[in-house]
Amino acid sequence: MDTHATQEQQATQVWLGLVLLTLGSAWLGETLASVGVTAALVALIVGIKGFLVIRHYMGLAEPGSRLRQVMRLYFVVVPVLILLAGVTTG
Amino acid sequence: MELAMTAHADGSALAGRVPGNRGIWVGILCELTEFALMFLAYAWFKSGHPEDFHRGPAMLLTAAGVANTVVMLTSGYFAVRALLAIRRNDARSARNWLIGTLLGGVAFLLIKAWEFSWNIDHGVVGTGNSFVAMYYYLTFNHLVHVVWGCLGLIWAILRTQFGAYSPEDHDGLEAATLYWHATDLAWIVIFPLLYVVK
């Protein structure tokens, strides 16, 4: 399989993963009674989705890239905020 | 601002290649900073009015939020396919994938309009409830960014149609798709804050 076909296949798999994570988080919100547990799982899902988009959609793949580090840091800090907002008010 | 933007004349960077161009990353980082402040405001008002935020998600049309998230992610996928197409020198496919991306943006706006109309019919208005006010502030702001993104995509579609991009030179197309992904990233956070977390 050539490089382009592999990249297209990978992009399709990432898209599928992102959609499944979205449906999973919506399902959690509908079914889980514990606000704290929901916030923790949703924060984790937001972090994973953010990392996937940054890596595979935006193409920030260079390990040493500061831009990549800043973008990934955003998706560490924001999920922590979601978690704290959920735990402290749940 | 240093980041990875210490680019050389050939477009390479000291700490790795910067996708798109420097200008679009200034816009993206400003956009994400703006949304980060709004997420802080969300946390602030949630701590002050926990009852509004606990009951808030149940007031909204969850199906519209899920549909819009799937539409944004799918549209982002089309944008990736457009970039891959231009890199293999297939401008026609790239243009078509970009049109698909744009249609995703239009679908997002139509779903949002339907959702706002549903909200009004069901009394979900932004007066007297901190959650609902936050919901409108976040979603209207995001909507504005979607409109900007759509305008950028239209520009990239026209440029692709008229042969402006090649496998070696397609920074403009990549910049339009990067902005689109940044708008997607903001929605990835907004969706659970408004529709999932109580």
Image (tube, coloured by chain):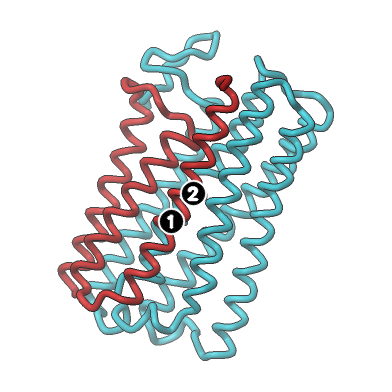
Chain letter of mark 1 equals A
Q: Which three-letter amino acid code belongs to the residue tagged 2?
A: Leu
- Image coords of residue B74 (percent x, y): 57, 51
- Image coords of residue B175 (percent x, y): 59, 33
User: What residue is shown at x 45% (from left), y 43% (from top)?
Assistant: B30
Callout 1 crowding tier (Cα within 10 Å): few <14, some 14–19, many ≥20: few
Separation of marks 2 and 1 at Cα, in angstroms? 6 Å
User: What residue is shown at x 64% (from left), y 55% (from top)?
Assistant: B105
Q: Which mark is residue A20?
A: 1
Q: Please tell me which residue lies in front, A13 or A47.
A: A13
User: What residue is shown at x 58% (from left), y 77% (from top)?
Assistant: B116
- Mark 2 highlights which residue? A16
Assign the N terminus of chain A to one quadrant of the image: top right
Callout 2 crowding tier (Cα within 10 Å): few <14, some 14–19, many ≥20: some
- Image coords of residue B184 (percent x, y): 50, 50
Chain letter of mark 2 equals A
- Position of B131 with respect to B138 (left or right) is left
Q: Which three-letter amino acid code belongs to the residue tagged 1?
A: Leu
Farthest-out residue, front: A1
Quadrant position of residue A9 = top right
- Position of A65 with respect to B141 (left or right) is left
Q: Are the residues flagged by discs 2 and 1 in contact, CB closer than 8 Å?
A: yes
Question: What chain is the cyan one?
Answer: B
- Image coords of residue A30 (percent x, y): 35, 76
SS state under label 2: helix
- Position of B177 with respect to B184 (left or right) is right
Assign the C terminus of chain A to one quadrant of the image: bottom left
Name chain A's colour. Answer: red
